[in-house]
Amino acid sequence: MEQQRILDLLGEMSLDEKINQLFQGCGSFYTEGSVATGPASEQGFSEKTILEAGSVLSVAGAETIRKIQKHHMENHPHHIPLVFMADIINGYKTIFPIPLAQGAAFNPSVAYTGAEVAAKEASTAGIHVTFSPMVDLVRDARWGRVMESTGEDPYLNSVYAKALVEGYQGDDPKKPGKLGACVKHFAGYGAPTGGRDYNNVELSERTLRDDYLPAYDAAVKAGALLVMTSFNTLNRIPSTANKWLMRDILREEMGFEGAVISDWAAIEEIKNHGLCEDKKGAAKLAMEAGTDIDMMTTCYCNYLKELIESGEISERLLDEAVLKVLELKNKLGLFENPYKDADEAAEKTIMLCAEHREKAKEAAKETFVLLENSGILPLKKEEKVAFIGPFTEEKSIIGAWSIFGEEKDVVSIKEGVDHYGANAIFAKGCDSIDPGKEMIGMGPRYACRRTKKEADAMIEEAVEVALKTDKVVLCIGEHMAQTGEAASRGDITIPKQQKKLLRAVARVNKNIVVVLFNGRPLDIRKIKELAKAILVVWMPGSEGGNAIAEVLYGETSPSGRLPMCFPYSVGQVPVFYSEFHTGRKLDYSNLDNKFQSRYLDIPNKPLYAFGYGLSYTQFAYSEVRLSNNLMEKGDELTASVTVRNTGKQKGAEVVQLYIKDDCGSVARPVRELKGFKKIWLEPGEDKEVSFKITEEMLKFHDINMDYKAEAGSFTVYIGCDSDTDNQATFNFI
Ligand code: GLC
């Protein structure tokens, strides 16, 4: 529809209609088939609000959505269509690996493909917008939502943010099979104090701008249609009420022109943060800050009219917000086609089709990270191997945000290994949840009612099985409900019963391969002590079992690298590679000197570094070659290495470029990722890998908060992970 027609429509709407256009209700107001994904705010919604609402979340299904939309259009005074939104985070029905796993692929096309498939399936089910990508930078493994992010690095997250938005939206979200993208959670949500969800966030403006904002900016520049506010405070102001964040940074500096939607109940929660006394006050603060859509509270629909009629806020602010919502619907083509891609017939064939399953399997294989391998992997198909552990048959491996995915559609390890035709025997050994425990708020399905006696008998049976084979593959990890929203953990180790199983098996069989399921980096020191190989498979999605079988048996070499380091222990957290020197950087050659930045009882370095991962082959790097040792303003350099596959199997190497600003007007990180390339090499093959180094890559917020590069020396590192010492230096003048 022409922009003028949109403006005319806005002019024709009554005050009530405009206010209700900003309300987003849960699908349960319209049908019983939806999924509640946040705290149920007290109902209090009028029938008029429901009838004149602007959008709906968490309902799916072509028939259901067509019915809701038809009824809504017939009853709305101006027949304005609803926009349907939902959390399609790593797939709709065909579930891909969780985003943290996708980050481990160090290959944005894995994310692009996953988003593309998700968009095709979800749009066919009638959904118009996904609340994705979540691009929050994460450096605290206690926080449950690290599973939704692509990791601890601003550059990696920015590359993935762009790929995800483009995967969902294509070149025009109005086109068939595309979704509008909603980037979240703006901003800084990934750094809650204590790693505790919804907690206060304390970031300096420089850290916010240098580290936390780039990925949101990348998503906005890629054309994301919406931005979602975050639950946290920043500078002690809740994002949803934070004018500086929403108007100055998001709209003015980043140039975002789309709609801003609150997170679930976040407008009302402004009151809980203590910035106002009631919902009316919350509505005022949110509207002034520029939050357009109110997800699931009565703040806007029940109090904006009073605020406008009393002159406490101007109707102009309301009109600006409503215009953003109408423009969103127009960008999705909903005025011309309110049903968009909802198609009951296509639903029956596209969901989990062979093509989508194959893509999910290939994606999963690229996300696995091999942390240890004595040479015990890859397995041989004909050798008899015992697969032991709860995750041999566990189907809850699709991640905490796969709200439309179904575990019945998941391929377990047992199914995958049997399908592969390997010579294997199996024993569960224990449940993925400790005896007598349950996942809070997740319902009876996520609980373990086994008695201690029963649980111990299972371990004994597993030990018997471990005695029958030369090798054991131990499939263990945290339950998927131990990560995700409101799932922070103070103890980031695997469940107790699984530790017991590991020890029991290790007592009778030393040839243990651990396949680790996790939604976050875990403290795996005990596992490292007892295992001869460790393959991190995260939450691998619908095709997990097939992907794991093919990698374990060497069909493909593991090629993932850690997008977030694995801490030595939770005591180190938050821990990340791009740290600072401090005034007393730990000198490992002088550990007798007490007065250095260190712990008395644990090392400074994580157990496994950012960017680390092994392959079934080995690689050798040449020294770093620079096209010049001098770089002038506006110039660029080329940095190159030659990488050789010195092993006996084809494999992938993620060649990583880091740059260190050796001296700046403020403290600079010890290094920062500025590029990466994933290359596959045959045995004996070598390849030159080059990176362009530009002035833009050297910029940061200097002592005056100006974003620019400063003259001086820079060190270039190119290697296999963030610990590489393969370096060369140049001067920027
Ligand atoms: C949740 C999450 C957010 C999600 C929203 C809608 O509370 O914080 O990521 O998109 O509600 O389900």
Image (cartoon, rainbow, N blue to C red):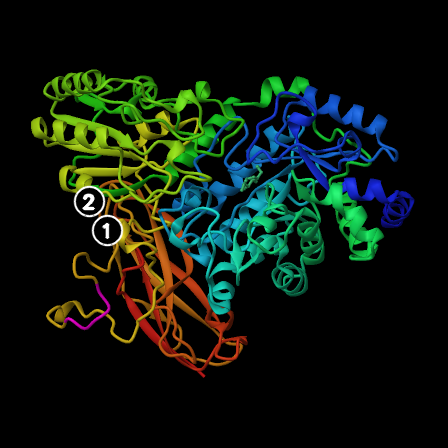
**Label 2 near label 1: C-beta < 8 Å?**
yes
Query: 319 left or right of 724?
Result: right
Q: Residues within 10 Å of mark 1 (few under 14, many from 20)?
A: many
The answer, for residue 328, to whether it is visible in the render is no
- Compared with 4, 431 (above or below) is above
- Compared with 183, 672 (above or below) is below
Q: Nearer the viewer, residue 689 or 509?
A: 509
Q: Residues within 10 Å of mark 2 (few under 14, many from 20)?
A: some
Question: Which residue occupies 53% across, 60% down?
Answer: 236
Q: Quadrant location of residue 87?
A: top right
Indicate the quadrant containing the C terminus: top left, top right, bottom left or bottom right: bottom left
Give the SS element for disc 1.
loop
The answer, for residue 302, to whether it is visible in the render is yes
Kindly identify which numbered label has been placed on residue 568.
1
- Judged by its main secondary structure, the magenta piece is loop
Q: Nearer the viewer, residue 19 or 92?
A: 19
> Identity of the amino acid at label 2?
Arg
Report the residue marked by disc 2.
Answer: 525
Q: Residue 410: x percent and y percent?
A: 42, 22
> Identity of the amino acid at label 1?
Tyr
Question: Which residue occupies 69% across, 19% down?
Answer: 63
The quarter of the picture showing ligand 1: top right
Give the SS element for disc 2.
helix
Kindly identify which numbered label has been placed on residue 73.
none
